Amino acid sequence: MTNEERKNFYMNRNIKLYPPYLALTWDVLFVWTILTMYYTTVKGLTFSQAVMLDSVQTISACIMCIPLAKLFARVNTVTATRFGNLGYIGFLLILIFGNSFFAFAVGTVFLAFAYTMCSVKNTSILNKSLRLVNRSNDYQRVYGKGVSIYYVLEALSSILATYLFKFNPYLPFYLALGFVVLAEIYSFLLKNPEKFQESNAVIDAKEEKLYNSVKKPDSFFKILSSSFVIILLLYAMLMRGALFMDTTQLRIYLQEITDEKTGIIPFWTFGYIFAFMRLCQAISSKYQFKFNLKFNLKSLIIFVVAFFLSVFATSITYLFMPQSIFKAILIIFLMIITCIIRQPNTILLNNYMQVCTHSKNHENLYALRTIAEYLGIAGINAIYAQLLGVFNNNFAYVNFIHLGILLIPILVVLIIFIKTLTRRYAQKYTIIKPEYTED
């Protein structure tokens, strides 16, 4: 087998194996639906301490992003994600055996390390593998398929974790540990794209010649001198904060309408409703590229406007409609719509990032975007917490006001982003809106 044949074989195999690997390393399974309950009922933490651990993760990720991008810049992408998986393993072991707030804070630092490493390096595996076999146009489809698989697994694990937690609160975390170990073993089936660096350099040269009229950032510091990148990071920061806050709201709505004493529908339906929403996100992730094929750069604006409208409608329904089974069904329906339209945001942004910047800068850009998103989460949640105090913990009213305030700056930044993209990268629409390859 020639070097060219080996390259094509291994990189095409990477592309086929990538969606399940992304699903296993996108986040920890079995954990998030029961984690707060586990902290407070099993490990003896207060609710305030459990919330503080989220802040520890946010701060840790912001601090670590750039140093990790620098430290692991010369480490092959697949090898680097194996270190990330070890971070997940450390997090889960501390969850199982730790017994103090300090121990769990250390575990959360492990989680921040793992999430940062996997979010930065996982995408590079796909980018580099696709480019080596001239399939860059397939990014959205392949990445979306991986996210789709994750949400299917997350939906099933949410239901199972709820039942297992009642039987033995440690069982979900042992299962989560097993899946992370499986991901680590699975990673050895992937081939480091950097082993074909010479071929990669040839592709880079061709790409530069083809798009020599487009000025792309070509170093870490020059990345932030790009107006396109700055606007992209601002949009990512604002929108990620809004999406994270809405995720919290979805959980609160579900808890309210399934409360054992005051709820409209039985409590046992909580896990199933949450799982169904995850399945809807899976479908949305899998087929978002078809929506983008039809609407191109208008896709993001459509998603943003539809997301905010569905959130506002949910808040109004909760606030003003009298208690009834119809109210519960309507809120669940609106939450499902929100879940469907929110998911493609990340995938579309990843696509624009990887086609409008040099491949050698992708990991630095992902690191900067992770920092921007965590800053957005921290800042917007801090404002949200203050508004809750002002409006006596009326979360639905605060959500309506808060997202109403956020809507205008997000839309303004998004419109500027699209205009910048149109002006500077008009000749790249054939990549942003591509012909996809069928496996």
Image (tube, rainbow, N blue to C red):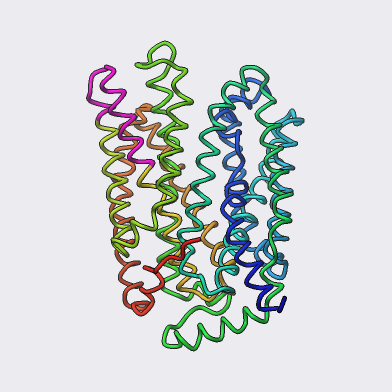
Closer to the camera, 13 or 184?
Answer: 13
State which region is magenta. Answer: 317-339
Displayed quadrant of residue 426: bottom left
Q: Position of residue 157 (x, y in %)?
A: 57, 32
Q: Residue at x 27, y 17 (%)?
A: 323
Q: Residue at x 36, y 32 (%)?
A: 390
Q: Position of residue 85 (x, y in %)?
A: 70, 49
Q: Quadrant of the N terminus?
A: bottom right
Q: Position of residue 254 (x, y in %)?
A: 41, 26
Closer to the camera, 40 or 250?
Answer: 250
Displayed quadrant of residue 362: bottom right
- Image height of 41 relative to 373, above or below: above
Report the predominant secondary structure element of the magenta stretch. helix
As drawn, which residue projects farthest toward the top? 261
Q: Residue at x 53, y 51 (%)?
A: 146
Q: Residue at x 60, y 30 (%)?
A: 35
As drawn, which residue projects farthest toward the front? 1
Q: Position of residue 301 (x, y in %)?
A: 29, 57
| Magenta stretch: includes residue 235 | no
- Image height of 136 relative to 182, above or below: below
Number of marks in picture: 0
- Image height of 191 relative to 429, above or below: above
Relative to 19, is 107 on the left or the right? Answer: right
Closer to the camera, 222 or 2?
Answer: 2
Relative to 61, is 423 on the left or the right? Answer: left
- Image height of 198 relative to 328, above or below: below
